[in-house]
Image (cartoon, rainbow, N blue to C red):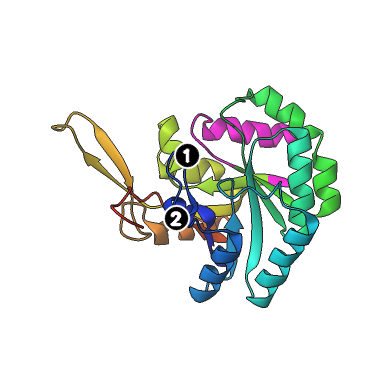
Amino acid sequence: MKLGISSWAFPWSVGVPGCAPAEPLGALDLVAIAAHLNVRVLQLADNLPLDTWNDIQLGELRAFSQQQQVQLEVGTRGIGRGHLLRYLQIAQLLDSALLRVVIDTPETRPTPDEVLATLRGLTADLETAGVMLAIENHDRFHSTQLVDILQRLDSPAVGICLDTANSLAAMEGTETVVRTLGPWTVNLHIKDVRVRRTNAGLGLLVEGCPAGAGQLGIPALLADLAELGRQVNVIVEHWPPQQASL
């Protein structure tokens, strides 16, 4: 188990749709930040896409991360066959043993059967490459649906990237998600939040906060995964509210 950060730990500094900073953080910047923070893993996710990088650029990124003693993990969004094969190649070029993926894109929302059919055509490539595909629980998919996909797929090269906050959008709390997805977890996203009443008490606001400052209960979460024998990398992400300045 290693502690790491994601490019989603600095969403406003990397840039989000409709809000691009004047000097956005890039992949090399994040490697340097990870080294400065003395964390050993950096997960480059879909907010810093790598599929337009050429092999020379990817080689420079790998060399710098090795120099800084930071292990890279690759992430993306979308499960199209060609797209995932490109990212599998990127993972190999960056010595990433893990490829984290969010199923949905703004343009595509595949059914569980469509997800299964696509992944069945990729498991042999993943197993040959020695790369683990980590499907992130994200919004509309319930944890039981994801388990059903994995059980039917039955591949040692596909598991779960367990995110501690995303499934709130599917009306599932962290305890439910960990209980259901824990046995399948190969990567962990720590994303702490506070939930409070708003609008004269007529609604709930879920707001990101620094890890350990919210309602997540991180020690208990790690203990639960340890009991399941899941010694996985722990990647910190952050949902900070927008501030007046970066």
Q: Which sits in the foreground, 45 or 55?
A: 55
Q: Which sits in the foreground, 208 or 144?
A: 208
**Which quarter of the figure is the C terminus placed in?**
bottom left
Residue under the image location 53 percent in, 35 percent down:
143
Instruction: Indicate the position of residue 136 as horizontal and vertical percent values.
Output: 58, 42
**Crowding at mark 2 (Cα within 10 Å: few <14, some 14-19, many 20+):** some
Looking at numbered disc 1 in the image, what kind of residue is underneath it?
A: Pro
- Give residue 13's mark: 2
Q: CA distance from mark 2 to mark 1?
A: 12 Å
Instruction: Indicate the position of residue 68 as horizontal and vertical percent values.
Output: 63, 76
Q: Which region shows up in magenta?
A: 136-158
Q: Is residue 152 above or below residue 70?
A: above
Residue at the farthest left position: 200
Q: Secondary structure at mark 1?
A: loop
Q: Left of 242 or right of it: where is 32?
A: right
Q: Left of 65 or right of it: where is 189?
A: left
146 inside magenta stretch: yes
Residue 156 visible to the viewer: no
Looking at numbered disc 2 in the image, what kind of residue is underneath it?
A: Ser
**Residue annotated with mark 1:** 17
Instruction: Indicate the position of residue 10 as horizontal and vertical percent values.
Output: 45, 56
Q: Which sits in the foreground, 74 or 151?
A: 74
**Which quarter of the figure is the N terminus placed in?**
bottom right
Q: Secondary structure at mark 2?
A: helix
Residue under the image location 23 percent in, 42 percent down:
196
- Give residue 233's mark: none
